[in-house]
Image (spheres, rainbow, N blue to C red):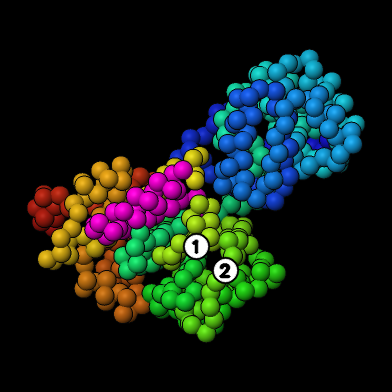
Amino acid sequence: MISYEQRQGQDEQPATVADDHIAPAPRVSVQAFCETVETAAAVQAAGEDRRLDKAHLKIQMGGMAAAIEAYRTAPTPNVILLETEGRSDILTGLDDLASVCDAGTRVVVIGRVNDVLLYRELVRRGVSDYVIAPVKPLDVVRAICGLFSVPEAKAVGRIIAIVGAKGGVGASTIAHNVAWAIARDLALDSVVADLDLAFGTAGLDYNQDPPQGIADAVFSPDRVDTAFIDRLLSKCTDHLSLLAAPATLDRVYDFGNEAFDSIFDTLRTTMPCIVLDVPHQWSGWTKRALIGADDILIVAEPDLANLRNTKNMFDMLKVSRPNDRPPLYCLNKVGVPKRPEISTSEFSKAIENQPIVSIPFEPQIFGSAANNGQMIAEISATHRTSEMFLQVAQRLTGRGEAKKPRNGFLAPLLGKLRAK
């Protein structure tokens, strides 16, 4: 008989892309047997989603009959996706399929009959999920990934990747301050992973000098598990930990595309929020880290090179992540004296999206924070950039509406009235 695993808490309606957080599927084999071209196209598009990147998907036509015939002489995969257009043949077909199905195989049925009694009968026969047609790619992704999420386990961590559109734009500084706001102001357990192993500054910014860090994990992939990662973490605050980079040049840090996969997968199981400080370079693993993240923030300065790079990254990520919300971007070091700049309106017109914040050029407070190993909020909790970092943290984590910085022309007058 087909193994039974009923997905708990099935949504009546698909969630919107903006607030839908789906855990990636592990390395599993999935075979789909479709009856309509539309469903086959949706399954094909789902197979290109980042959350099914590790799954091996194969699509065939013929529906239930083709699946039964195929598995008479071949072993069944981890997941079978079946489309059926009728009602009377579903139960009979499942009984025939059970006779040739291996133990442990999970079955997801796509049908057109919206009937709770039918759903209960399917569950009784061991079907893991029943999805109402017509389906969209995200429906297929949710159905497959939901099979491997444990309802009683902790929520899978959200990965936030922050990267600079150009070198030296301050992406690391923003990543560290945003992570600080997530941990301190939102009280969300977080970890900062410094992926710039040669020149990372997270240890300096948080005034930490741990003897071990992310290099120990990436060079020992066979040892990576929850206990090993916990030993490598350096505690910065009650809610913030650091996976520091060695920032030395005694090794050459050339990695394969999947070098950090096991680290990210392990962090997801232990931390609600993971902030990746991604270095400004273009390689297989940096591209994979960005595409695989749940949310992305691009940091840029208001000049032509940054505009071009932001546009290129923005367009590439939107195409590579069709079922996710588009990346966010912010402008940094706005208003440098005597420097010609592209205005925010022109920048946003070219990107076809507004920046989440525009951080002004504040060399005094940023320089003091960097040299003292402190965050901006530690130096001045009421500074306007501290509010901006909180605003970014709220947008990236989906925790509440972002606050607007207090920069209205009546702010000084209102402040005096409150003081009186």
Q: Is residue 5 left or right of residue 329?
A: right
Q: Secondary structure at mark 2?
A: loop
**Magenta segment: does it hold 59?**
no
Q: Is residue 320 above or below residue 128?
A: below
Residue 152 seen in the current view: no
Identify the image quadrant of the C terminus.
bottom left
Q: CA distance from mark 1 to mark 2?
A: 9 Å
Task: Work out whether residue 138 or residue 56 is closer to the camera in this orientation and state it.
Answer: 56
Q: Quadrant of residue 205?
A: bottom left
Q: Earlier in the sequence, mark 1 or mark 2?
A: 2
Q: Where residue 238 sits: x, y (%)? A: 48, 68
Q: Where residue 250 sits: x, y (%)? A: 52, 85
Q: Which residue is mark 2?
A: 255
Q: Where residue 153 sits: x, y (%)? A: 65, 51
Looking at this rendering, what residue extends furthest in the bottom direction? 250
Q: Which residues lie in the magenta part?
A: 293-319
**Magenta segment: does it hold 305?**
yes
The disc label shown at residue 189, or none: none
